């Protein structure tokens, strides 16, 4: 497509012409100095792909100067991570999503300009090809496994996330649940000593102001003592669900390719196409 700007010059009295030229130059306003870049349209044939497969793509490009120094397919890699731990003794759950750049965008494929690829109907040169996806980008997903791999959990989960899970779970535990974990299951403290860390607090009916029962409340000074014991309980014991016979773990690592097509025309003006994302599954 060509845009034609027509300029109509009218003869005006000499003084008016000179004055207008000094104040306002229409050519200077409408025409930008410098070289124009190429035009490029780019699409991928899918929004997701298997690792090890090829992703089809299609691009159209053209330039006013009809010269091309570089034609390149680029992509970068984004990594999405999900972490999740759920207690097997109550409903407490902790999750975290994060995203980071696994690799900055770089050239994957280079092409030579071929004049025979010109499409008269589209008034553009065409490249219809595909780019490879490495097997190493296959996703990793762990969800409620039936066996526990401590080395794997230590490698995949940030230590700070596991510590946060211990902190949050401890705050949700009442006397009975903490007794179940520390006294009955882990045997880290005997019952008599455990009870010394709690006060019996009366429960008052707000309407009648009568005592209707009592509850055991952890003493403030006992929290660090009991938490120290609690932190010694193996993670696998805290996340095992005896009803489903599974360890309540969620971990996923999924990669997404963000691809673009780059065209540098004969004037060395660089243009990138719109970015297209392809999730690897």
Image (cartoon, rainbow, N blue to C red):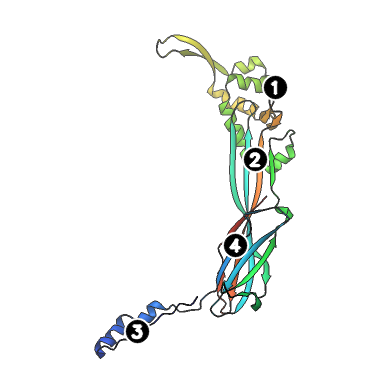
Residue at image point 44% right, 12% down: 205
Residue 203 position within the rendered picture, expressed as x and y whole percent measured from the top left: 48, 14
Q: Which residue is mark 3?
A: 8
Alpha carbon distance from label 4 to label 2: 41 Å
Between disc 3 and disc 1, the foreground one is: 3
Identify the image quadrant of residue 194.
Answer: top right
Q: Earlier in the sequence, mark 3 or mark 1?
A: 3
Q: Which residue is mark 4?
A: 43
Q: Earlier in the sequence, mark 3 or mark 2?
A: 3
For the residues labelled 1 and 2, say whether their Cβ atoms are less than 8 Å apart.
no
Residue lying furthest bottom? 14
Which structural element holds mark 2? helix
Residue lying furthest front? 121
Is residue 112 visible in the rendered image? The answer is: yes
Alpha carbon distance from label 1 to label 2: 24 Å
Between disc 4 and disc 1, the foreground one is: 4
Which structural element holds mark 3? loop
Q: Which residue is mark 1?
A: 185
Q: Earlier in the sequence, mark 4 or mark 2?
A: 4
Which structural element holds mark 4? strand
């Amino acid at each position: 497509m060509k845009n034609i700007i027509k300029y109509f010059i009218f003869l005006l009295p000499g003084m008016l012409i000179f004055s207008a030229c000094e104040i306002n130059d229409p050519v200077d306003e409408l025409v930008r100095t410098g070289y124009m870049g190429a035009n490029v349209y780019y699409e991928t044939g899918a929004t997701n792909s298997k690792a090890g497969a090829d992703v089809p793509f299609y691009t159209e490009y053209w330039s006013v100067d009809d010269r091309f120094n570089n034609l390149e397919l680029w992509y970068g890699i984004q990594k999405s991570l999900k972490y999740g731990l759920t207690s097997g003794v109550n409903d407490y759950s902790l999750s975290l999503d994060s995203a980071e750049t696994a690799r900055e965008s770089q050239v994957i494929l280079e092409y030579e300009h071929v004049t025979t690829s010109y499409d008269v109907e589209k008034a553009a040169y065409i490249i219809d090809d595909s780019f490879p996806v490495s097997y190493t980008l296959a996703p990793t997903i762990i969800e409620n496994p039936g066996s526990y791999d401590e080395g794997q959990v230590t490698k995949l989960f940030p230590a700070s996330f596991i510590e946060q899970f211990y902190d949050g779970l401890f705050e949700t535990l009442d006397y009975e649940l903490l007794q179940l974990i520390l006294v009955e299951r882990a045997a880290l403290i005997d019952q008599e000593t455990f009870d010394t860390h709690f006060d019996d607090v009366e429960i008052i009916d707000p309407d009648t102001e009568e005592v209707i029962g009592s509850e055991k409340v952890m003493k403030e000074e006992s929290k660090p003592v009991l938490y120290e014991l609690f932190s010694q309980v193996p993670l696998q014991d805290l996340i095992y669900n005896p009803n489903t016979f599974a360890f309540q773990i969620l971990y996923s690592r999924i990669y997404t390719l963000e691809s673009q097509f780059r065209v540098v025309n004969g004037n060395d003006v660089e243009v990138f196409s719109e970015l297209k994302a392809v999730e690897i599954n």
